[in-house]
Image (tube, rainbow, N blue to C red):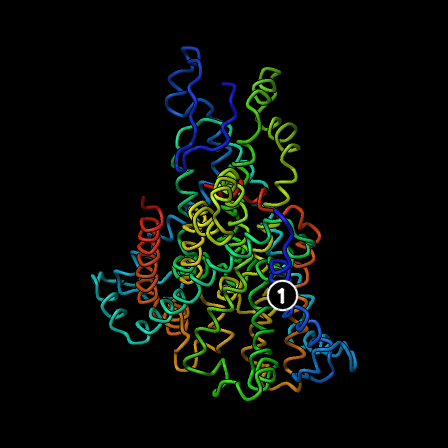
């Protein structure tokens, strides 16, 4: 074993064949692996995943199929199985339908905007440009900053008499941004694009390093313009990063909570910017129906997984 | 490639748009009266720290900052101890269940955390009675899976000869991890620590659900509560809100700017390329 495993196929740990261990140890080795100490090293993390990830995942599904409510600690209560009732209630609820519709609207704005801006910025940053470290900091800094702090400034900037409306003068929307039915959700989508863009730029920058330089050279000697090179070499070259960016944007959309809760004052106006997680919080915690909230969560995850799979299929065909 | 003006102009114009809200946050937090006019953008016309005093009166800045600090430190500690051990085991040791653990670790990253919020709330707050406690806050974030993944990638990139030699010398695995492997990946560990830091420091939903007592709330939660409940009744709500926002944003921004060399695509690249 002399080579260093640098890139390995995803999802499989590299188990390299070695000389067999001496006979008495062999039985133990087949039971626990060649280095059982690894089990001890990994045990706390595995226990963590079981307690904080696997068990709650199962519990979410279980709750969603039962009539579940909060009871005093230690109280014995009956929580009958109700089949798909919670799902029927939730899917027939206009508030929930509106929230899911809002996420679709969010994704339709956020995903194309993120992909296009991040790829253009990454390509520009990849070339020699003065002050790269300043630019890098500028583009990543919203990503590392708390949403709550950034929402505070946007509230100020986009308020009725705020800076943006002052700048727009007569062009300012009426009603103003955050209380406008048609603009509240798009504004949240733009906010999230702005906040997360730095990370997508980073992913594209990493992907650009893997596009062979010769491809640009041969395209250039064939007389292809800069724009044609970008379209025919860069875009296909960074396709795996695009898949990842789209999946991450979908997950961000599914997780949306802080922005509708704070920026548009609880998904206003009239639920026009409510997100599924906001509705989950309202139903599950505020109104005490965790069963309905769990059903929303399960539907949400199925949606995310479906979008991720479809996106992988579309972007990775050929 | 040659330098081109349009590209430079585009990059700097975009950067201005990204940085402007931060400048406006700071500017607004120091203004005696909120001035939203175009002229108000300029750094002229009076400075005051009244807004910081005002937000300190309402949300107990120091206590909130301490809570954020304890929450974040707890997560960092668990991630650096147990995450490094797990990353090392996944990269360098062969044991039963290794492949499955790796697969689950990848899966964790695509399941939206928010789905788990309701069952976690049921477990942690109702079941374990950990409402208004640091442990309850830390538990779901204790070991950052992205960091574990990055640790594994870093350890994988080290040459196997190094480990074989240390083992021949009779060094224990713990000793190899501590004295051989860790010093070689130290810059990368810093990157992973930075990524881990911004998670709990910036997190809102989970600590918001777990803490009802004002004395236990991290700054993100107490500031958000101030924005949504009390701000309407204050004289200069925006001044105080923006002062709070500056205090919340500053530690992450300062750390990031100080260590931005480590936050590059090559360091992270190894972490994100599955």
Nearer the observer, B247 or A114: A114
Give the image location of residue A211, x and y in percent: 49, 41
Residue drawn where x is 43% and y is 56% of the image: B113
Q: Residue at x 44, y 11 (%)?
A: A22
Question: Which quadrant of the figure has residue A142?
Answer: bottom right
Q: Where, quadrant-wise, is the C terminus of chain B in this rendering?
A: top left
Mark 1 lies on residue: B13
Residue B58's image quarter?
bottom right
| Residue beneath the point at 53% across and 33% down | B88
- Pinpoint residue B191: horizontal percent, then vertical percent: 61, 45
Parent chain of label 1: B
> Can I make out residue B133 in this image?
yes
Q: Position of residue B223 (x, y in %)?
A: 60, 71
Whether residue B148 can be seen here: no
Tell me if mark 1 has few (under 14), some (14-19) or many (20+) residues whose alpha carbon lies within 10 angstroms of its own.
few
Q: Foreground: A83 or B231?
A: B231
Image quadrant of residue A169? bottom right
Q: Is residue A140 above or below residue A22?
A: below
For this view, does B21 lie left or right of residue A284? right
The correct choice, above or below, for A281 with respect to A269 in the image is above
Query: Could you tell whether B85 is left or right of A60 in the image?
Result: right
Q: Residue at 52% x, 46% y: name it.
A: B143
Name of the residue lying farthest toward the top: A23
Query: What secondary structure is marked by label 1?
Result: helix
Q: Nearer the viewer, residue A81 or A268?
A: A268
């Amino acid at each position: 074993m002399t080579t260093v495993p640098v890139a390995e196929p995803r999802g499989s740990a590299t188990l390299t064949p070695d000389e067999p261990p001496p006979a008495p140890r062999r039985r133990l080795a087949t039971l626990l692996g060649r280095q059982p100490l690894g089990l001890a090293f990994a045990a706390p993390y595995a226990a963590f995943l079981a307690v904080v990830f696997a068990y709650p995942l199962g519990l979410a599904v279980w709750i969603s199929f039962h009539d579940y409510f909060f009871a005093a600690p230690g109280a014995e209560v009956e929580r009958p199985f109700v089949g798909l009732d919670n799902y029927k209630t939730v899917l027939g609820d206009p508030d929930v339908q509106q929230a899911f519709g809002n996420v679709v609207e969010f994704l339709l704005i956020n995903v194309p905007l993120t992909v296009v801006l991040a790829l253009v910025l990454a390509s520009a940053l990849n070339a020699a440009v003065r002050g790269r470290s300043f630019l890098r900091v500028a583009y990543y800094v919203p990503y590392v900053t708390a949403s709550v702090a950034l929402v505070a400034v946007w509230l100020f900037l986009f308020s009725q008499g705020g800076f943006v409306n002052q700048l727009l003068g007569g062009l300012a929307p009426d009603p103003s941004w955050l209380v406008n039915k048609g603009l509240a959700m798009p504004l949240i989508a733009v906010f999230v694009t702005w906040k997360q863009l730095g990370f997508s730029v980073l992913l594209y920058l990493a992907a650009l390093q893997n596009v062979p330089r010769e491809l640009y050279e041969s395209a250039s000697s064939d007389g292809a313009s800069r724009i044609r090179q970008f379209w025919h070499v860069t875009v296909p070259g960074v396709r795996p990063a695009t898949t990842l960016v789209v999946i991450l944007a979908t997950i961000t959309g599914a997780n949306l909570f802080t922005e509708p809760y704070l920026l548009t004052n609880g998904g206003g106006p009239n639920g026009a910017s409510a997100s599924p997680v906001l509705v989950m919080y309202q139903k599950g915690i505020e109104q005490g129906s965790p069963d309905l909230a769990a059903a929303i969560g399960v539907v949400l995850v199925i949606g995310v997984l479906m979008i991720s799979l479809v996106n992988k299929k579309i972007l990775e065909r050929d | 490639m040659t330098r081109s003006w349009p590209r430079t102009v585009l990059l700097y114009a975009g950067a201005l748009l990204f940085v402007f809200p931060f400048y406006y946050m700071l500017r607004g937090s120091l203004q005696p009266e909120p001035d939203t006019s175009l002229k108000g953008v300029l750094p002229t016309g009076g400075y005051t720290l009244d807004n910081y005093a005002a937000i300190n009166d309402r949300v107990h800045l120091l206590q909130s900052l301490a809570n954020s600090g304890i929450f974040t430190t707890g997560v960092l500690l668990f991630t650096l101890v147990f995450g490094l051990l797990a990353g090392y085991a996944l990269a360098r040791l062969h044991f039963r269940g290794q492949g499955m653990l790796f697969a689950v670790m990848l899966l964790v990253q695509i399941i939206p955390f928010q789905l788990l919020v309701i069952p976690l709330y049921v477990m942690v707050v109702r079941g374990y009675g950990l409402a208004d406690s640091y442990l309850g806050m830390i538990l779901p974030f204790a070991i950052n899976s992205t960091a574990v993944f990055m640790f594994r990638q870093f350890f994988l990139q080290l040459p196997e000869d190094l480990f074989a030699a240390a083992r021949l010398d009779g060094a224990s695995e713990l000793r190899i991890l501590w004295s051989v492997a860790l010093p070689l990946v130290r810059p990368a560990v810093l990157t992973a620590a930075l990524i881990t830091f911004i998670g709990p420091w910036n997190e809102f939903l989970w600590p918001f659900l777990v803490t009802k007592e004002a004395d236990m709330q991290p700054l993100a939660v107490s500031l958000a509560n101030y924005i949504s409940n009390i701000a309407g009744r204050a004289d200069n709500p925006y001044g105080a809100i923006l002062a709070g926002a500056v205090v919340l944003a500053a530690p992450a921004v300062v750390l990031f700017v100080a260590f931005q060399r480590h936050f590059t695509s090559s360091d992270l690249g190894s972490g994100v390329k599955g």
